[in-house]
Structure formats: structure tokens, C-alpha cells
Amino acid sequence: MSHTQNSQPQLSPIPLQQAPRAELAAVRVVASDIDGTMTRDGRLVGEVLDAIGRLVEAGIEVLPVSGRPAGEVLGLARYMPGVRRAIAENGLVRVVPGAEVTPLGQSPDRARLLDVAAAIAPTGRPLRLAEDAFCRLCDVAFERDGRDDASLAAMREAAEQLGIHLLWSSVHVHLSLDPPDKGVAVRGLCSADGIAAEHVLTIGDAPNDVGFWVPGRFGVPVGCAQVMQQRAVLTEVPRYLVAEEGDGWLEMAALLLAART
Ligand SMILES: [Mg+2]
């Protein structure tokens, strides 16, 4: 399609309900962000956990892909019904409960990343190390502390000038040596399993999910509705939209299951 070319303006997202049924019926993997995507008001609710189980029973893998640290995602994946593996730290670590934790990026130079964090934060408003920093393998994360997209974009630019990658989610600000890209990690994992990208649905809600939405990368790139409020700082937008947060995730799951009957 023409919008796979960078020179083309990106198309505006359309409701996932309008996706061709055959496209939805072909989905074999749901690669999903967690915070703001599977959650409702910051909590994983029973309805979403049940929907994960129904998708897995229908033969669709649910692959959590989070900016949360390796240690935390390992625990989450272990307790999600039917989930057998996940990706943490925005694509920098792969975790398989009961089997292995595999860094996909290099170990962070913590001292350097902390120096950069101190250098790029606005005067009087330093970045605060995330509470989960102790269980991270490949990045260093800070609390977002309610910072707006414009101030985060300014910090991203300052970090890039120092040769460091910065990205943010609804909850955290991440600094890393390797470019974090959830989409690259998912593609690597699926291609190792022989799953073609057109059989993968990706879903997220924030700037750390843009790797999910690069045109041509995945069959069904989806965003939760709140993503459009952040459009000014997104380098990519999803092709499809669902409702906000966990309600959107439930909408997506219902559409996939309906397409298979
Ligand atoms: Mg999120």
C-alpha cells in the first residue's frame, strides 16, 4: 500500500470495527502493551484476564510487550492465563517464565545514564529513579511524575544530542544505550517462530509503542483511543483505533473472536 512509503502522508486511523474480517481472522499473535492498554485506571481487571484466556483458547497467542522491567514482566507473564512469554523494557529483554530471561540489548552504563538524566532534566525538577529500577537489565527508568509530552520531547532531544535514547510511556521515562523498539523485538520473536508479520496484531497507547505502528511492519496495528491526544509527539500512528485503555482491549479481543466464528 502507498502509505508504506515514508514520503506519503500517514493515513488517519479508522475504527478497528471497520477492519476487513479476513484481516482479523488471520491474526495468530496479539502483541500488547500493558499499562494504559490492558489496564483500567492502572489495574489489570478480571474481564481482561478472562479475555486473554479466551484468545489463547482460540489459538491466538497473547504476547505482553511492556516498558516495565524484566523482573516485573516475568512475574506478570507467569500469572496471565495462557501467556508463555513476554517482552520487557520496551523491547530490550525477552522473558519466558520457567525457562529464561534474555537481554536483547547491552547492559546499561548506569553511571552514564544517570549523568545524562541529571543533565537533561529542567532546573529544579530532577528525574526521579523509578521504584522498579532494581529489576531492570537493559535500561534505566524514571518516574514520569506527570510531565507533559512537550517537556518530555524537549528532554528526548537533549538526550539524543548526548547519544542516548529516551522514550516515555504513561508511567515512566526510559534512558538506554540501544534504541528501544517494541516492534523490532516482536518481529524478531515471530520470525524465529515462522509467524508472518501479517498474522500479528499490535496494540498500544503511548509514544513507547510507535514501533508497533510503523507502516508495513504488522498486519493489524492498533492504538487505544487516548493515543490520539499525544499525536503531536508520535513519530507513527496506528492504522486502527479502539476505545480507551482496557475497554479498548476488550473491544479488540471481541472483534478477533467474532471474526473467527
Ligand atoms: Mg502503555
Image (tube, rainbow, N blue to C red):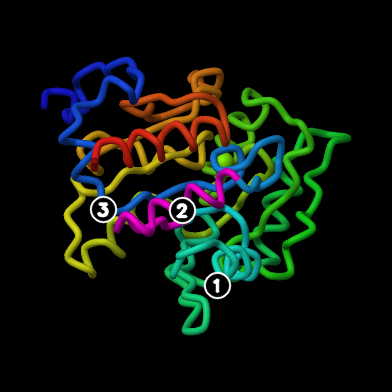
Disc 1 residue: CB within 8 Å of ligand 1: no
Q: Quadrant of residue 114?
A: bottom right
Q: Is residue 60 left or right of residue 134?
A: left
Q: Earlier in the sequence, mark 2 or mark 1?
A: 1
Residue identified by numbered label 2: 180
Disc 2 residue: CB within 8 Å of ligand 1: no
Instruction: Estimate the x, y position of residue 214 in percent, counting from the top left.
Output: 30, 37
Q: Which residues are magenta?
A: 47-63
Considering the numbered disc 2 on the image, is that residue within a helix, a strand or a loop?
loop
Instruction: Estimate the x, y position of residue 28 in percent, counting from the top left.
Output: 26, 53
Q: CA distance from mark 2 to mark 1?
A: 13 Å
Instruction: Estimate the x, y position of residue 240 in percent, counting from the top left.
Output: 34, 26
Q: Residue at x 40, y 35 (%)?
A: 252
**Contact flag, marks 1 and 3 (Cβ < 8 Å):** no
Q: Residues within 10 Å of mark 2 (few under 14, many from 20)?
A: many
User: Residue 107 got which mark?
Assistant: 1
Amino acid found under the numbered disc labelled 3:
Arg
Q: CA distance from mark 3 to mark 2?
A: 24 Å
